[in-house]
């Protein structure tokens, strides 16, 4: 028996004892097929847990679907302006000498009376001070049902809603449009207006009340002519 064969036999004989003494060598195959141990399948938590909640299925929206928009918008505008102008003008004209017309007829350029004579004296002073303040605050709260106009490739939805209310010859029209994400739509099929991108809200009033609050034609002319 040569030396190589003898070394191979010694390594084969000592391999099991080395594996048993090592902390880093694990025989997974022996653990899986250990005698007396029956492998158990993974436990389904949905069958044994009382607190397990199933994951909701992803909703698929299509064109012309209906979604309710909860509108709660507040807008505030404040403007202040002050103007002051001061203009002063002085105009004076004086004649110190006059021609002698009799000498002029005789082809002579003699001066007449040399006493000063004030011809024009004018002075003007104009001063204007104006100040104006403007403040407006609007609040719009409503629930409007919108229609899906388009479903973008990334899943975003383009919504548009129109609501018209007529009462006692007064007509109020709401038009709302914008883009919303699918994930922002609740299970109750609602979405907040604050979660919409490119939000556009138009409120239009028609009727006698609107006409009574509108400025008259003559008033608008006077305000245009006498803006200052």
Image: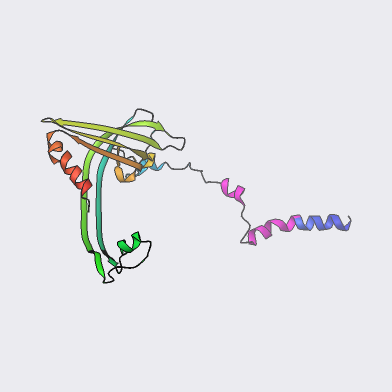
Q: Quadrant of residue 89?
A: bottom left
For the C terminus, the image quarter is bottom left
Farthest residue toward the bottom?
115
Foreground of the two, 25 or 106: 106
In the rendered image, residue 184 lying in the magenta stretch gets the answer no
Residue 59 at x, y percent in the picture: 38, 34
Residue 34 visible (yes or no): no
When the figure is inspected, residue 208 is found, relative to residue 25, above or below; the finding is above
Image color mode = rainbow
Say whether residue 7 is left or right of residue 160: right
For the N terminus, the image quarter is bottom right
When the figure is inspected, residue 81 is found, relative to residue 189, above or below; the finding is below
Q: Quadrant of residue 146?
A: top left
Q: Which residues are magenta?
A: 12-35
Q: Quadrant of residue 93?
A: bottom left
In the rendered image, residue 27 lying in the magenta stretch gets the answer yes
Say whether residue 136 is left or right of residue 209: right
Farthest residue toward the right?
2
Residue 11 visible (yes or no): yes
Which residue is painted at 15% across and 37% down in the image? 210
Which residue is painted at 21% across and 59% down in the image? 131
Residue 161 at x, y percent in the picture: 29, 33
Residue 83 at x, y percent in the picture: 25, 60
Foreground of the two, 98 or 36: 98
Which residue is painted at 24% across and 38% down in the image? 203
Foreground of the two, 36 or 100: 100
């Amino acid at each position: 028996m040569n030396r190589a064969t003898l070394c191979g036999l010694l390594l084969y004989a000592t391999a099991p004892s080395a594996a048993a003494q090592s902390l880093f060598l694990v025989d997974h195959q022996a653990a899986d097929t250990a005698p007396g141990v029956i492998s158990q399948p993974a436990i389904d938590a949905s069958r044994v847990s009382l607190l397990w909640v199933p994951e909701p299925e992803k909703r698929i929206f299509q064109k012309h679907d209906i979604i309710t928009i909860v509108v709660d918008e507040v807008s505030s505008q404040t403007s202040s302006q002050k103007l002051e102008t001061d203009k002063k003008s002085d105009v004076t004209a004086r004649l110190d000498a006059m021609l002698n017309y009799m000498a002029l007829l005789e082809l002579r350029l003699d001066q007449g009376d040399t006493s000063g004579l004030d011809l024009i004296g004018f002075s003007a002073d104009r001063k204007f001070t104006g100040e104006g303040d403007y403040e407006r605050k609007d609040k719009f709260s409503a629930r409007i049902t919108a229609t899906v106009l388009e479903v973008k490739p990334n899943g975003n939805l383009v919504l548009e809603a129109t609501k018209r209310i007529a009462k006692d010859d007064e007509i109020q029209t709401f038009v709302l449009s914008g883009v919303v994400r699918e994930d922002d739509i609740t299970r109750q099929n609602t979405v907040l207006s604050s979660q919409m991108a490119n939000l556009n809200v138009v409120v239009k009033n028609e009727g006698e009340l609107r006409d009574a609050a509108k400025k008259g034609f003559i008033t608008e002319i006077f305000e245009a002519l006498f803006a200052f």
